[in-house]
Image (cartoon, grey):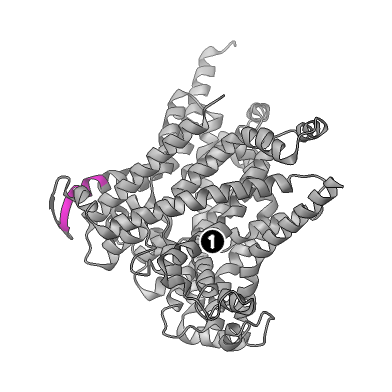
Amino acid sequence: MSHPKKNITLQKKQNLFGWAVLMPAVFLIAAMSFYPMIKALILSFETGIGAKMRFAGFLNYTRMFEDKIFLQALMNNFIYLIIQVPIMLIMGLILASMLNDKNLKFRGLFRTAIFLPCATSLVSYAIIFRSLFSVDGFINLLLVKLGILSSGYNFLANPISARAVIIIALLWRWTGYNMVFYLAGLQNIEYSIYEAAKIDGASPFQSFWQITVPLLRPTILLTAIMSTNGTLQLFDESWNLTNGGPANATITMSHYIYNLSFKYVPNFGYAAAMAYLILILVAVLAFVQMKVGDKRD
Amino acid sequence: MIDKGKRVFQYVFLSIVSLISVFPLYWMLSAATNKSVDVISGKLIPGMALLANWKGLLASQNVTGAMMNSFKYAIILTLISLLICSLAGYGFEIFHDRGKDIVMSVILLAMMVPFAATMIPLFQMFSKAGFLNSTIGFVLPFISTPFLIMLFRQSARAFPHDIIEAARIDGLGEFQIFYRMFMPTMRSTYAAAMTITFMNAWNNYLWPKVIMTDNESLTMPMLIANLKQGYVTDYGVLMLGVLLCTIPTVIIFFILQRSFAEGITGAVK
């Protein structure tokens, strides 16, 4: 410490280097996320076409709740969220704790197979599932051959079965993805805890609920927030699997926003208001999940 | 005895789930090599119609163009994104102080922003700037993501400070320390980041659908989504398109699977 002055300038220099390397990323997020967000907020209070926008107050927001298609889309997103996300997370957890068993043979093979759907693009799997579930598709063929159906059933033409197909497809695509997060989280839990529990006479069911779930809580919280966020923004599946049909019965909010902005006569103000509602929902749900997930008992 | 029963159940259960996971992809593979009639009749063995399907696909679509576009967009985005985000993660962690920690928590808020909310203003900005139908238009919104910054920040936490001090004493500049010491040690994090970024870029559908308005700029997912718009579906041709769109991400997946899992493990800790 004979040269305190030199040290201070050195530290200053390093501090500046730190700022310099993080600035490009920060600037891009500000310009590509925060700035458009503010623009969208302003837009959501305006109405009109193209450059001729005028202030409209809360008109776009009140109009939303009289718009039958929008309410349908909102409901669909929540149906997907409430049914699909819990099943997927629980399945992911069960699979991860099974695969964490060190005495299991073919672990790598099982893990790869279950994780594999994540390698398919969203458009690809949507088209594959549309084909599998079409009237002349493989699922119908199988059901007829097994004698469950007498002739091909048009799954995508009935609102309930069409939604079910979307949920099945989502489960197929994302369960393995969440499982990998849980497997990663399980690496941090000492395996001996499980062995000790077994010696104490705990059933696998008990050690799942008493050890795995509590210790994985931060990871479960992370995946729950990510899945909620993703489900509220579904677009590719709605577009490519059912095209929102039959008669908008499976349309999602993002799909409807796209239609309003780029398919019909562009109504950017109204679409922006809807997008803002998604933003608020995402934020509120994430907040609730954090409150619930962070509770320590 | 009970233990044995449980074991059997475990294997049966995992086998069924694995089968369900793999089957749709196998079906796609076999359909791509069969005639549409055979696909509809339920044939599950690879056939000989691959070449015919390929000709049918080429006749209606510019597959090579879309492939080239998708590769170009995805590779450029991945390279820039990894550089920018790893630099930022390194800066946030190694030189962290109160100011930087505050900036980081503000950035994390961007994770909550749904793309639907920024899509319309971005479209307006980009069409004014002349970025429609361009690589820069595809890439710009996704270069810097809070997720990647966080991933690199988290892994930089495990990078020993002694090494940095030693390198400084040896006279290495700050930037040299980053690319000569940090980058090679963080190989598995880079692999995980690369997998995620490349796959997201390749699979992105909504944004290119918004800004790629002319046929020359089509991406693979856009091309296969257009394939469905016929009166009669030719399953052979359709599934070949889907297969071509899937191959690159599956290859990346198999090469990087292990390091992906390791990288995620580091981030979850």
Judging depth in this view, the residue of A192 and B99 nearest the camera is A192
Q: Amino acid at mark 1?
A: Ile
Q: Is residue A276 above or below residue B120?
A: above
Taking the view exactly as shown, the residue that stands out farthest to the top is: A2
Quadrant showing the C terminus of chain B: top right
- Residue A217 appears in the rendering: yes
Residue B144 location, x and y as percent? Answer: 45, 47
Dot 1: within a 10 Å radius of its alpha carbon, few (fewer than 14), some, or many (20 or more) residues? some
- Residue B177 appears in the rendering: no
- Give left or right: position of A275 versus A186: left
Judging depth in this view, the residue of A82 and B56 nearest the camera is A82
Where, by quadrant of the figure, is residue B103 drawn?
A: top left
Where, by quadrant of the figure, is residue B153 drawn?
A: top right
Q: Which residues are magenta?
A: A41-48
Q: Secondary structure at mark 1?
A: helix
Residue B116 location, x and y as percent? Answer: 35, 53
- Give left or right: position of B151 versus B229: right
Q: How many marks overall?
A: 1
Residue name at image x 56 percent, y 83 percent: B236
Q: Is residue A154 above or below residue B169?
A: below
Residue name at image x 74 percent, y 44 percent: A100
- Give left or right: position of A6 versus B206: right
Residue name at image x 46 percent, y 49 percent: A82
Label 1 lies in what chain? A
Where, by quadrant of the figure, is residue A189 drawn?
A: top right
Which residue does the numbered mark 1 point to in the structure image?
A168
Q: Is residue B45 above or below residue A64?
A: below
Residue B135 location, x and y as percent? Answer: 42, 62
Residue name at image x 73 percent, y 48 percent: A99
Give yes or no for residue A9 being in the magenta stretch: no
